[in-house]
Image (cartoon, rainbow, N blue to C red):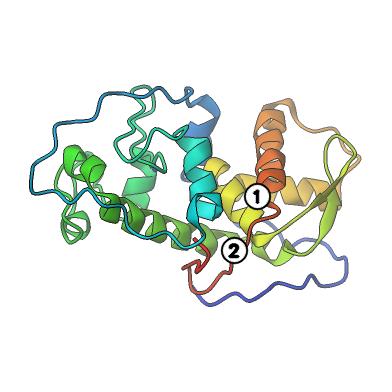
Amino acid sequence: MSIEPVQGAAMRPARRVKAIAKTADFKGTLARAQAPFQPHPAPARNSGVAEARPAARGGESGFRGRIAAQESAGAGWAARNLSSGALGRYQMLPVALRDIGWQDAEGGWTAQAAASGVRSESDFLASPAAQEAAMTRYLQRTEQQLSANGALGAAGRTVTAMDGQPLPITQAGLVAAAHRRGAGTVARWLDHRTRTPDAPVPETSRAAFASVEQRLRDFAGLSYAVRGGVSPSA
């Protein structure tokens, strides 16, 4: 397919959202064109690879469980999207794996990935523990970017969505939206809805903004505590 601790984020009085920093919108660009997930047969597994899933706090109804349900349609750890190259339970795109330092510019697996037992795509797909480690690092990067561009500070607010309905902003929703569309897109959406809500939505941004709002709604009821990038509810 991501810090200083950021606490609960009680929203300050209404004010101009800080100018949006140009952060690495490392997933948003590809997400717009990403084809629907289509399961692909799992690669042959070595008999020595552990099959047990790592414990996930919050279970399948928790934050990571819902991400997996939406990203890989429940296809599991060996899920592969042939169109986008997204891998695993959380459908990590190659650009995201590069961003967290697990792949190099040529798509080779790095020493950071090897430290989690991953030296190939097959290793990654066969290792739940490695996928959880990659997801943790990805969430750390996402949180860093949301914090840097000011979006994370909006948690606790309610804004008017593009359909005119109230939309609560939560930590879980912000991180989930950035997981799908990138932190930069989330910040641009927030800037539009808080500074110029009556302005027309640019046609080039409409689909991305709608996706952000859907993720905010889908994850609004889930717990997600931002603590140095690690969510204890994950």
Left or right: where does residue 21 sit relative to residue 138?
A: right
Q: Residues within 10 Å of mark 2 (few under 14, many from 20)?
A: many
Callouts 2 and 1 close, C-beta under 8 Å: yes
Q: Residue furthest left?
A: 47
Residue at 50% from the left image edge and 66% from the top image edge: 231
Residue 219 disc label: 1
The amino acid at mark 2 is: Tyr
Q: CA distance from mark 2 to mark 1?
A: 9 Å
Q: Please, what secondary structure does the residue beneath circle 1 have?
A: helix
Name the side, left or right, on which 160 lies relative to 183.
right
Task: Look at the numbered disc 2 and give the secondary structure of its residue.
Answer: loop
Q: Can residue 165 be seen here?
A: yes
Q: Position of residue 135 (x, y in %)?
A: 39, 54
- Camera-side residue of 28 and 155: 155
Q: Amino acid at mark 1?
A: Phe
Left or right: residue 92 versus residue 71 is left
Say which quadrant the N terminus sits in. top left
Judge left or right: residue 132 versus residue 2: left
Q: Quadrant of residue 129?
A: bottom left
Q: Residue at x 49, y 55 (%)?
A: 59
Disc 2: which residue? 224
* Residue 65 point in image, percent of width and height: 49, 48
User: Picture coordinates of residue 40 (x, y %)?
Assistant: 30, 23
